[in-house]
Image (cartoon, grey):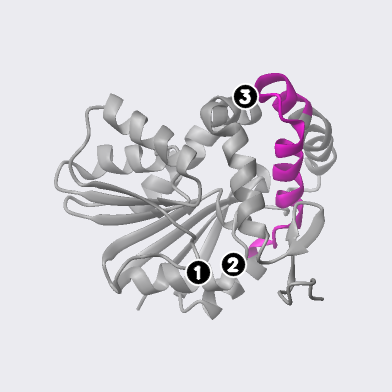
Amino acid sequence: MTGTSGSRRVDFGARQVDADEHPSLVRGVFDSVASRYDLMNDLMSGGLHRLWKQALIDRLNPRPGTALVDIAGGTGDVAERFLRRAGETASTIICDLNANMLLQGRDRLLDGGRIDGISLICCNAETLPLGDRVADACTISFGLRNVTRRTPALREAWRVLKPGGHFLCLEFSPSVLPILAPLYDAYSGKVLPALGQMVTGDRAAYQYLVDSIRKFPPPEMLAGEMAEGGFENINWRALSGGIVAIHSGWRI
């Protein structure tokens, strides 16, 4: 289906919008919550997001000198973990659609005393303003479900990787273990939007985040989209009863 602008329709949470409108709507969501995004992550996950992101870095296992492109890197917590593990000779380019999120990331890294080897770029994941084959690794954490078109974004991640480069995606999954599903649905559907209202004053933003998780493809479908994007040797690992998954792929 297409809208009046002629662009196709895409999911924005529980509703569909014109693809051309989608990036600005996503930007508006994160404009609203940027200053308390990390706090909300702690409250919403009970701190588990820290363990999930550490599992991502453990899987990446970066070496000294590794060059990372972190897509939807926002507040810089993944980049901070990466730089701590990879050391002073490593470098990272943090890309995010939202300038306010990048400002939070800049402040985090400055407060941590790290200024060298870091670039921040406000851009769309589907059109990264980077050259071909510039990165040893590429990550995206809790961001892929917010892009307008996943396959073009995955192709961009593949493009910026050097041959032999590693791509990792950490994302919420709809494939929660059946024994956990009723409790998880109740928590995400009722508690999270109310918590968002209480902490940030924006219930709608967190209702969007819940709905975007429910619309996200299951792990095996995402693996297929990664293959369409050019990746090989694709696999995934479910964490916390399937609440999140880490997908791995390589540019061969």
**In the image, which residues are magenta?**
194-219
Residue 198 showing in the rendered view: yes
Residue 31 coordinates in the image, percent (x, y): 57, 38
Which of the two discs, 1 and 3, labels the residue nearer the N terminus?
A: 3
- Residue 178's place in the image compared with 135, above or below, is above
Question: Secondary structure beneath disc 3?
Answer: helix
Measured Cα–Cα span from mark 1 to mark 3: 30 Å
Q: Check disc 1 and report the residue beneath it.
A: 154
**Disc sitting over residue 150 in the figure:** 2
Q: Residues within 10 Å of mark 2 (few under 14, many from 20)?
A: some
Question: Secondary structure beneath disc 2?
Answer: helix
Give me the residue at 17% from left, 50% from top: 64
Q: Check disc 3 and report the residue beneath it.
A: 43
Which quarter of the picture shows residue 219? Answer: bottom right
Measured Cα–Cα span from mark 2 to mark 3: 28 Å
Task: Give yes or no for contact between labels 2 and 1 (Cβ–Cβ under 8 Å).
Answer: yes
- 2 or 3: mark nearer the eye: 2
Q: Quadrant of the C terminus?
A: bottom left
Give me the residue at 27% from left, 41% from top: 83
Give me the residue at 49% from left, 60% from top: 124
Drawn side of residue 224 relative to residue 51, left or right: right
Residue 48 coordinates in the image, percent (x, y): 56, 32
Measured Cα–Cα span from mark 2 to mark 1: 6 Å
Q: Label 1 is placed on what type of residue?
A: Leu
Drawn side of residue 52 relative to residue 120, left or right: right
